[in-house]
Image: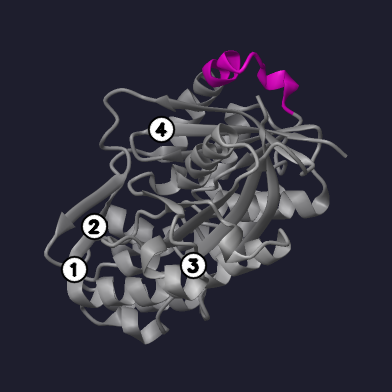
Amino acid sequence: MHTAALLSLATSVPPHTFLQKDVLAAAWDIFGSRFPDYERFASIFHNTGIVKRHGVKPFDWYLQPRGWPERTEAFFEGAEALFVDVAGKALADAGLMATDVDTVVTVCSTGIATPSLDARVARRMGFRSDISRVPVFGLGCAGGASGLSIASRLAQARPGTNVLLVTIELCSLALRLDELTKANIIATSLFGDGAAAIVLRAGDGGATRIEHTGEHLWPDTLDVMGWSVDPLGFGVILRRTVPEFVTERLKPALTKILARMQLSIAEIDKFICHPGGAKVINAIESALALDQGTLEHERQVIADYGNMSAPTVLFILERARAKGLPARSLLTALGPGFTASCVSLRHAA
């Protein structure tokens, strides 16, 4: 069967930039007097490895209480703008028009839209009326890798057609001023907004091809990561220490996934990993016995953009492609479920 080739990859962030030191100062004002022993938790901001992040709203917007209507309005406005921008760049890089797109896969877990985002921007983009739309919700941080897996299989199923993958996450809109929990403090210290888009086609062209895809769902792990929902919006769930989970369980899961691909860890020339934060990056290097500092692109992206959930691993792939991919790379991401999602990339120099 024809494997899907990666024709282009583009990324985009919203216009507002937040320095981590300013977010920390604001968090002190918001939580410091109301959260017992907040000083101990405030050190989390220094340990993330983040220098700056981006948001769809100006900084002061996040300092006022917001409910579902305001968050949803901000989501529609910000997500639609990012979709048009990042999809337009990816299509231009592939030498295509919006009318050339046969299937669009849209991955997003930080807002709810019915009709879905792809329908909301269809006229502005110029999509054909017979385009196949595949909106995907709930994958969280694994969405970049899982979305690429889904899009590649759709491209492979119909060789010669163009599949557009768009991942958008506006994590900043889930910032909560009312939740005095460690999970909310961690989320405030980590998450930013961003989008990435990829054009795929099976049957011709492209130096980088999707070789294999795979996932591993750990049983009894619903409490590791996810959303709670209440009248004010989403609230983050982080009830286990993700770095410890990665250290203990990542390598056995990847070994099983690779075995189904008839590969081994030793045959992977480069790992491209979703970075939950600095400690998660260290845990991945430890779990996979990589030299400290191997995941340089992961550290650079987390420093420049924070954790953008699903698009983040595609930002890292963009940097890895620019530097030059080896013969075989493994794209990996962890997300709610708790799930490991992997995509094996084969590159011809």
Q: Secondary structure at mark 3?
A: helix
Mark 2 or mark 4: name the one nearer the start of the chain.
2
The amino acid marked with disc number 2 is Gly
Q: Which residue is mark 4?
A: 339
Mark 3 or mark 1: name the one nearer the start of the chain.
3
Region rendered in magenta: 255-268
Q: Nearer the viewer, residue 301 or 216?
A: 216
Q: CA distance from mark 3 to mark 2?
A: 24 Å
Q: CA distance from mark 4 to mark 1?
A: 29 Å
Q: Secondary structure at mark 1?
A: loop
Q: Which residue is mark 3?
A: 83
Q: Which residue is mark 2?
A: 235
Can residue 54 be seen here? The reply is: no
Q: CA distance from mark 2 to mark 1?
A: 10 Å
Which residue appears at 33% of the width and 69% of the height? 173
Q: Is residue 113 left or right of residue 269?
A: left
Classify 191 as above or below 77: above
The amino acid marked with disc number 3 is Phe
Q: Secondary structure at mark 2?
A: strand
Q: Nearer the viewer, mark 4 or mark 3?
A: 3
User: Does the CB distance between marks 4 and 1 fall below 8 Å?
Assistant: no
